[in-house]
Amino acid sequence: MGDTISAISTPPGEGGIGIVRLSGPSAIKIADMIFYSPRGIKPSLGQSHRLYYGFIIDPETGEKIDEVLLAVMRAPYTYTREDVVEINCHGGYIVLKRVLEITLRYGARLAMPGEFTMRAFLNGRIDLTQAEAVIDLIKAKTEEAERLAIEHASGSLRRVVEDISGGLQDLLVEVEAYIDFPEEDIFHSPLNLTERIKEFHERLRELSRSFYQGRVLREGLTTVIAGRPNVGKSSLLNALLGTDRAIVTDIPGTTRDIIEEVINVKGIPLRLIDTAGIREAKDIVEAEGIRRTEAAIERAEMTLFVIDGSQSITFYDISILERLKEKKKRTIVVINKKDLGLVIKKEHEIFKGLPAIEISVLKGEGITELKELIFSVATEDMANLTTSGVNGVGNSWRGLEAPYGSIITRQRHKVLIDEALQAMEELYSLLNPHAMNINGEVIVAEGSSTSVPTELIAFFLRKALNSLNQIIGIEFSEEDLLQRIFSEFCIGK
């Protein structure tokens, strides 16, 4: 953390502009050595957060490397809370490479992946959820994923977690105060401990349940297009994408390998996978394609099961469908070739319990309705997960107005929240129907002498609190606890 780092901050390749960024105590000093201003302005003497026109030069030879705009940003009002210099160059690979090499030669070292954001976290500018949101924002595939990432980057998730952990801290302070200072007159009214634990439990459960929604927005749903050969799987992929991505012929078995593309269905990114048709393989290549198809179906979160509605149900249709039902996969039955006249319709008994739709890929009929159905199936688990308008399946995603701060997007978040949730569940099971009296003792129903030690209550509260604090990357230490106790209860005055 004591050195100065440098890196090319724009994507590789040619472009109009490319940026070399420096951060650290020597960033402005290095800029003084390699930047020449026709007006004689030295970066170290210039105003912060201003652009200066000039040239990057090689101090040894005086050679001009590029014509640039240089920005000086002084700590602590920067992304990393260190001195930052950004050199706006022309976007050619060689130009950027040479400018970077000059910065490294005169005192910087090459930054590690993500090190600028890591320094922002270590210097206290952002928490872990905000750092993760930076990557999510860069990789967002839809506007809704971008909105979610921006909200998290602005600290919305941190505030939700801090609100819950703050309540747990308050409760822990009260419990620990009684343990450490039982002679003090701390409790003036019942703590209603059971009800407070129940409230924390409910809030954590809602947060945990939001993971599916958040993960779908961030990563999308892996969706396999499956079926036997020549039923229109590749044609359906092309129709959903709006482009000829897959080769389409009348020859069964044309698709030998899986093809992946991402589409946006009303704000939800779908990773569409076109697969080889399932049948008895004619050769070793097709056999490998079918093996990959079966593996893709196993991994998929949703399947578009395509059948040729102009022909009778076949053994392969039935076997694929039974496998999908057995695995309890989200499945939509797509009955294609409606233009040829349907022998099989969506009301068929074999499709009972599954959403089905009749389409004609060739005529473009039913594609819009299929997208609506895909959205409906993809979001059915999101109904009633939040209190901000998630009222049911089939609504426009933008109309849901989900409280993005209350949506978790990463497995790490869910694991830690579930740990806190488990601690609350274990504590609640101990307390219910217990209540804490004004002396801080946990008692059971009248006539029983059973009690729960306050030390055990404190243990579970600490366990939950530690898990929540790991989400945002902070600690609640013994010193913090004592400070809260003394400040709030005036003990030892």
Image (spheres, helix red, strand yellow):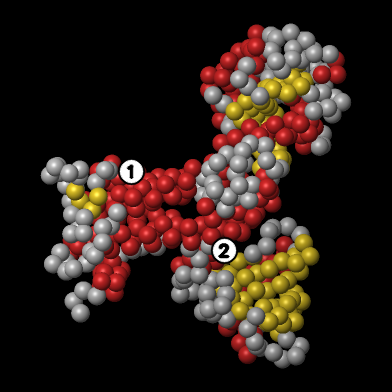
Q: Earlier in the sequence, mark 2 or mark 1?
A: 2
The image position of residue 188, as x and y in percent, is: 24, 65
Instruction: Residue under label 1, please give it.
Output: 425
Instruction: Residue under label 2, please give it.
Output: 154
Between 318 and 432, the one lying in front of the other is: 432
Badge 1 amino acid: Glu
The image position of residue 368, as x and y in percent, is: 78, 34
Q: Residue 41 appears in which quarter of the rendering?
A: bottom right
Q: Is residue 165 left or right of residue 149?
A: left
Q: Residue 45 appears in which quarter of the rendering?
A: bottom right
* Neighbourhood count class around disc 2 (C-alpha, 10 Å): few under 14, some 14–19, many 20 upward: some
Report the residue at 63% width, 83% height from top: 48
* Neighbourhood count class around disc 1 (C-alpha, 10 Å): few under 14, some 14–19, many 20 upward: some
Q: Is residue 43 left or right of residue 339?
A: left
The image position of residue 266, as x and y in percent, is: 71, 43
Q: Secondary structure at mark 1?
A: helix
